[in-house]
Image (tube, grey):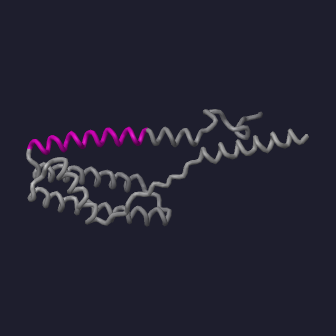
Amino acid sequence: MKKLVGILVIVFLVSTTINAQGKKINTKKRANFNAEQTATLQTKRMTLHFDLDKNQEKEIYNLKLKQAEKRVANTEKFKQNKEKGVQLTSDQRFEIQNNRLDNQIETKTAIKSILNKEQFEKWENHQKVKMRDGKKRMAKAKRNKQEKGNKQGGKPRNSQINRG
């Protein structure tokens, strides 16, 4: 009887340990930079990557600062809506996506006027790589989310089985 209780305790401890290891808590937090800090870092990255001169660097900084300020304002607006529990209508979603695309067009035009031809081609290639990598990352996150939500391999739980 003592051996049976001992074995049950060991099995219980092992199963508890396995379950605890399976749950990962997302401890990564992004740095919360202000608009000026973000613009400075992005400008320096571009200076290193595209070999910008001082005049180009100043213009890129102004462009990135404007973008960062817009991003901060939009983030605050989204946070407020989320706290209030406001659901966006399809027209509002369309407006947001339309504004985002307009901003991308403006950015591309501004970058094209600031950079020379070789730098701009390098920037466009860099943007394509970033877009491709972002899509891969999003697809992987989606797969991981689906796997976590469906731990039984597509089989319904016992309570979900129709017994009729």
Q: Quadrant of the N terminus?
A: top right
Q: Position of residue 57 (x, y in %)?
A: 14, 57
Quadrant housing residue 29? bottom left
The secondary structure that dominates the magenta segment is helix
Q: Residue visible at 23% across and 63% down?
A: 65
Magenta-colored stretch includes residue 133: yes
Q: Position of residue 21 (x, y in %)?
A: 61, 45
| Location of residue 161 (image quadrant) | top right
Give left or right: position of 93 versus 55: right
Quarter holding the C terminus?
top right
Vertical comparison of 104 with 6: above or below: below
Q: Could you tell whether 72 is left or right of 156 in the image? A: left
Q: Nearer the viewer, residue 79 or 127?
A: 127
Q: Whole-percent x and y of residue 136?
A: 38, 38
The quadrant holding residue 134 is top left
Q: Residue at x 13, y 61 (%)?
A: 58
Q: Which residues are magenta?
A: 117-139
Give the residue displayed 73% in from the left and 35% down from the top.
162
Rendering coords of residue 41 (x, y %): 25, 58
